[in-house]
Amino acid sequence: MIDINLLRENPDLFRASQRARQSDVGLVDQILEADAQRRQSINEFESLRAEQKSFGKKVSQAQGEEKETLLAEVKTLAQKVKAAENASNEAQATQDELLSRMENLVIDGVPTGGEEDYVTLKTVGEPRDFASEGFEPRDHLEIGELLDGIDMARGAKVSGARFYFLKGAVARLEQALLWMALDQATKAGFTMLTTPTLVRPETMAGTGFNVKHDDEIYRLERDDLYLVGTSEVAIAGYHADEIIDFESGPRKYLGWSTCYRREAGSAGKDTRGIIRVHQFNKAEMFVYCPVEEAEAMHEKMLAWEEEMLTKCGLSYRVIDTAAGDLGSSAARKFDCEAWIPTQGTYRELTSTSNCTTFQARRLNIRERKPDVVGPNGKTKKGGTRTVATLNGTLATTRWLVAILETHQQQDGSVRVPEALRPYMGGMDVIPVVAQK
């Protein structure tokens, strides 16, 4: 949720942000109007309440006819107070509903526009030249089947389209990625969390997902719970309604979870293999920090993602995602896209988002401000303020697509990137399995 005080003081900032996102600019004025109505309603209610209290003193001191007259006035006043209270509550509800629709204020410098309007910040590594090696690369599913490591047919038999089984060395390769991500994150000061994959609607909404209109989300109606599409959701709710102490630095967590997405609206897209599936595993970074440190932390998280990609021997590019493709919570998002040989293009493997105070304000997550010593030498308690939250991917099942295709050999076997070999029991090549 955005800061209503900031919007009231700088509405043009939010109008510009909405334009950059290609979203409804008029929403800013609707919120301002609702805010003015809310404040007016509160003033009317408080004024009538004060009058009601003063009448109470008069009634207690009056006698006879005067008291009867005052009691009649008190009854009428009580009705006015109740009506003013209802009007105030309705105005607050209207403002809250409008604020819930307002997306986060984008950070200055984020590209304007939609999905295709990103800016490429850098390209790292050269795509492998298979032609010079004398063979045509296979796609990841064909390789996975040669290795007896990906079984889409039985996944569909058991669960339906876009489900799969990972087997043998390919299943171990996925776990190797997750373990390597954990070791790297632990070295960087992250605490591992295995997270719930079912969350309450208030946690989902607090993270910034629209549970009423998001067709990507699986819902368990009987229990009023939602399956998460990322452990970001559960970790964002981990410190809900708490005051965090940052004396020892930002709170950094690495969440391990299975993730679920309905992939609504993706009919016909990436139906082959495991690029776009309903269930996958992910290691997700999540950080709580003071607002002033958020942009620097965002750069660090991007660097950690790039470190993982380099260890996996992948060619990739980093893009600054355009405002219209950010999602409601992110103020800025960097994507790392790896080269997929058989597609001849870059595909997203990781993203990292700076959500500033948007999620924490919804979830009521604060830090305590330092105490202040006044001119009289007395110490005044510092109060609290909203923290910033950030998230970023360190490894997912989709990475297998890029690794299998990039490191394939002519016979269909796959060289294991050196950094992953200790997690593969020393295996340096995943061999083709004789078909039965």
Image: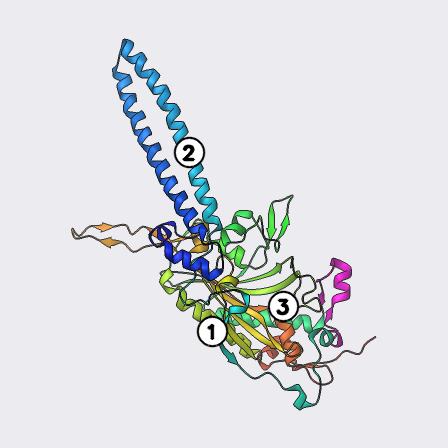
Q: Quadrant of the C terminus?
A: bottom right
Q: Nearer the viewer, mark 2 or mark 1?
A: 2
Mark 2 — residue? 87
Residue 25 within the segment the image draws in magenta: no
Residue sitting at x 65%, y 68%? 275
Mark 3 — residue? 397
- Say above or below: 423 vs 3: below
The spot of residue 104 in percent (x, y) is 45, 57
Is 315 on the left or on the right of 15, as rendered?
right
- Say above or below: 59 vs 17: above
Question: Which callout, 2 or 1, points at the residue further toward the start of the chain?
Answer: 2
Residue farthest to the left, as pictured? 376
Mark 1 — residue? 303
User: Viewer-proximal residue, 92 or 380?
Assistant: 92
Instruction: Report if the CB atoms under discs 3 and 2 are less than 8 Å apart.
Output: no
The spot of residue 129 in percent (x, y) is 63, 86
Residue 149 within the segment the image draws in magenta: yes
Query: Which residue type carries mark 2?
Result: Ala
In what element is the residue under mark 2?
A: helix
Instruction: Report if the CB atoms under discs 2 and 1 are less than 8 Å apart.
Output: no
Q: Nearer the viewer, mark 3 or mark 2?
A: 2
The spot of residue 115 in percent (x, y) is 54, 66
